[in-house]
Image (cartoon, rainbow, N blue to C red):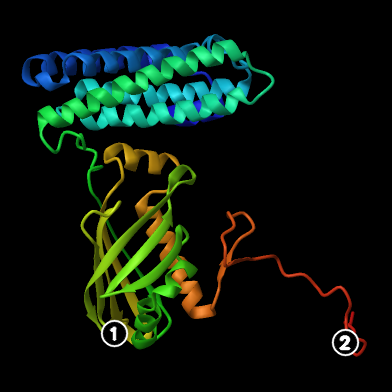
Amino acid sequence: MTMSNAISGRSVGPTASVAPLAAHVRSHSHRMTHEHPTADGLARGLGWFSIGLGLSQLLAPRGVARFIGIADDTRNCALMRLLGLRELASGVGILSSRRPGGWVWARAAGDVMDLALLGSAMASDETEKDRLAAATLAVIGVTAADIYEAVRLRETSGPLASAGGLGLREVHVRKAITVNRPVKEVYAFWRDVRNLPRFMQHLESVEEIGDDRTRWRTRAPAGMSVEWEAQTVEDRPNDRIAWKSVEGSQVDNAGSVRFVKAPGGRGTEVHVELRYSPIGGAIGAAIAWLFGESADQQIYDDLRAFKQVIETGEVLVSEGSLGHRGRYWQRPAQPPANLPVDWPALED
């Protein structure tokens, strides 16, 4: 309910939400002070800062918009409320979590989004450039504090602190799909690495470099690209292919794909499993998620594309979808502009 109110621009009443939130934070922060000292100091300060900023954005979005130099129209007010909800979630998470490092990383990821929004606003002629510049410098300073504290918590609280209970340290994805082709054909198609960019949306190229090694190049969030080398560690014809990145790669990853005969003669079940550590750890995963590029969604989309490629020879996407090289737009059926002369006339 609160999220939908924020998106649509409807006001959020303070009476229903602020009091329970304050009580929740007070009870948890008191416990954290005595039981979990890693949440003290700067982390606690960042948590309360998030709550203060979030309440300001929720309760006075027009004032905050004017303060940073942007128009206080309905669209920007709705955006302010949405950002306020994010800040409140981060603040409560930091103050109530036993391992707040992941929530601090989430704050840093939010800072990156804020900087992107401020940069976009700077290009508009309807904004106050001096106020925007000051707001940008302030966000840069807060980002530095967030990253500093997140790294400190990771170093002082053990390897799980950076994940903060959010599961962001290592990504583990399992997906499966059934395709209407025999196992032998599906395995052969996947085994030829030149076919992979045909259905993997973010993959730019894969090339064999010898000794069961391949070089991968893929697009990353925010227009970046990443390269790494992988070693094929298992190749059982018509059964399973497994790989892992070589030591020193930019992306530490391992995965496998299994080909299982589907029951009832329905073709082949393709089971994909992938484990990888995001570049930048928790903040890398969070930024990828903000850009809509999570591993779970990528593999789901790629398997659907794989099904279309191997069954029809091409990937068809609707007009409402983003385009992609090698993919074809589906369009509604249209009658030909000129009918053949001998085309039979329709009877009334």
Amino acid type of the residue that numbered disc 1 sits on in the rendered structure: Asn
Q: CA distance from mark 2 to mark 1?
A: 49 Å
- Tell me which corner region of the image, top left, top right, bottom left or bottom right, holds residue 215: bottom left
Amino acid type of the residue that numbered disc 2 sits on in the rendered structure: Trp
Q: Which residue is nearer to you in this view: 3 or 195?
A: 195
Q: Which residue is nearer to you in this view: 166 or 230?
A: 230
Q: Is residue 36 visible?
A: yes
Residue visible at 40% across and 14% down in the picture: 53
Query: Where in the figure is residue 204, as x and y percent of width and height?
Result: 47, 61
Q: Which mark is residue 272?
A: none
Q: Is residue 1 visible?
A: no
- Front tag of 2 and 1: 1
Determine whether 228 is above or below 185 in the image: above
Task: State left or right for residue 226 relative to residue 328.
Answer: left
Q: Which residue is mark 2?
A: 343
Determine whether 229 is above or below 5 in the image: below
Query: Where in the figure is residue 4, as x and y percent of width and height?
Result: 49, 31
Q: Which mark is residue 238?
A: 1
Task: State left or right for residue 249 relative to residue 126.
Answer: left
- Tell me which corner region of the image, top left, top right, bottom left or bottom right, holds residue 88: top left
Residue visible at 50% across and 73% down in the picture: 308
The N terminus, quarter of image: top left
The secondary structure type at the circle numbered 2 is: loop
